[in-house]
Image (tube, rainbow, N blue to C red):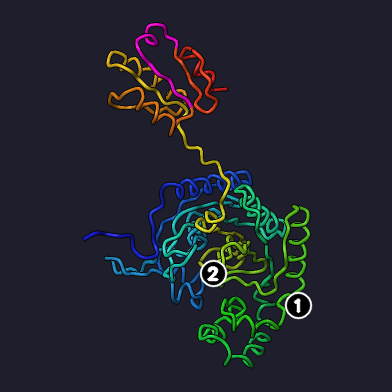
Amino acid sequence: MIHKAIRGTKDIYGESIDKFDYIIKQAEETFKDKGYRHIITPTFEHTSLFQRGIGEGTDIVEKEMYTFYDRGDRQITLRPEGTASIVRSYIENNFFATEEISKFYYYGPMFRYERPQTGRYREFYQVGLECMGSNSYILDAEVIYTAFSFLKKCNIVDIEILINSVGCPKCRTKYREVLKSYIKERLDNLCNDCKVRYEKNPLRVLDCKVDSCKKEMKEAPNLLEYLCDDCNTHFEGVKKYLDMFEVPYKVDNRLVRGLDYYTNTVFEIVTDRLGAQGTILAGGRYNNLIEEIGGKSVPAIGFAAGVERVSMLLENFDNDNRFDIYVAWMDEDVKEYTFNIINKLRQNNIKVTFEYEKKSVKAQMKKAAINSKNVIIIGSEEKESGLLALKDLDKREQEKLTINEIINKFRK
């Protein structure tokens, strides 16, 4: 029997892993510059965490979670998203007692039982950040600015930033009733999923991707017109500071996001280069989630980006993974001397590769040209003189240097 990867999963290697590593590197640099610290949470959690956090009426909880009972008869779920786990960690480890504001970034695999398609897998990777402890609209703008900066750092520019406010429970309750009245008149023309959403969470009907539903909801009441004074002031502040951060954006009053925990600011960064799967990055504020999961009332905001989708947009990136130096050795009598040279280079953080067994100089030079920037050939003459010929394979230039001179050259 030949085993193959399970449908909706894949091996990541070659150029794909180069892109993956590059994206994570750009994310880490961007997030650390804004004061975020790396956090790693378990890949699986108690199912109830996601039911309470994401919302039992959502597609993720009802249709897409990988849930099972372990040997202790505990109901366990592979995490479908990152926020709920980080909130659980925030509460469990009492970060709120020691930090006024907590900033975390993360990356890792998530799991959803969806129909596999371009840019969407059942095991997929996300990179994101969460900030707990402030309700400032300046923070909202900075988080969106950070998301924009991350994609810009990846040289991804064909994007559009969409923002909206879904208000607070107070003003959303009023809007919910108005929206239900609007939907009720069109219920027969909506898809089966939206008929269920109408009962459980009518705002989700605004988020439906089915063309017929989008057509029916085109003239739906504008949520922004129902915001309370506090929520309206908050949203105006977000827009003001996005302008100050010089972040281009568009207000989309149909944007509600697919998770129940969002309040106030929500946003997506989208592109038309990925077809139907146009969302690259999304997030928003979730001021009630920490309390809902069992902690204190602490405001929070965050976002996540799909690594696979970012990777599909990645074109120009530094993919030079060559070694600094390939050390070729000619005879058995210089083998030990050669390995001493290699050790000195490596001790000074110079990336070196070599052959473990003797090969012809021609074969070694051919390999050096593929995976290295420079080459050193060591024979009896080099061993006796202590001078090594360092050849730059890109510039086709060569110079004779001592080992210390070579080390100093690479340090510079």
240 vs 394, nearest the viewer: 394
Amino acid carrying label 2: it is Glu
Q: Residue 255: horizontal and vertical position, in percent?
A: 65, 71
Query: Residue 284: in sight, yes or no?
Result: no
Left or right: 147 in relation to 89: right
Q: Residue 285: image x %, image y %?
A: 63, 64
Per the image, the residue denoted by label 2 is 292
What element does badge 2 sit on?
helix
| 161 lies above or below 216 | above
- Image quadrant in which the N terminus is located: bottom left
The answer to whether residue 377 is magenta is yes
* Quadrant in the picture for residue 325: top left
Contact between marks 2 and 1 (CB within 8 A): the answer is no
**What span is in magenta?**
374-387
Q: Circle 1 is placed at which residue position?
A: 225
Camera sees residue 2 = yes
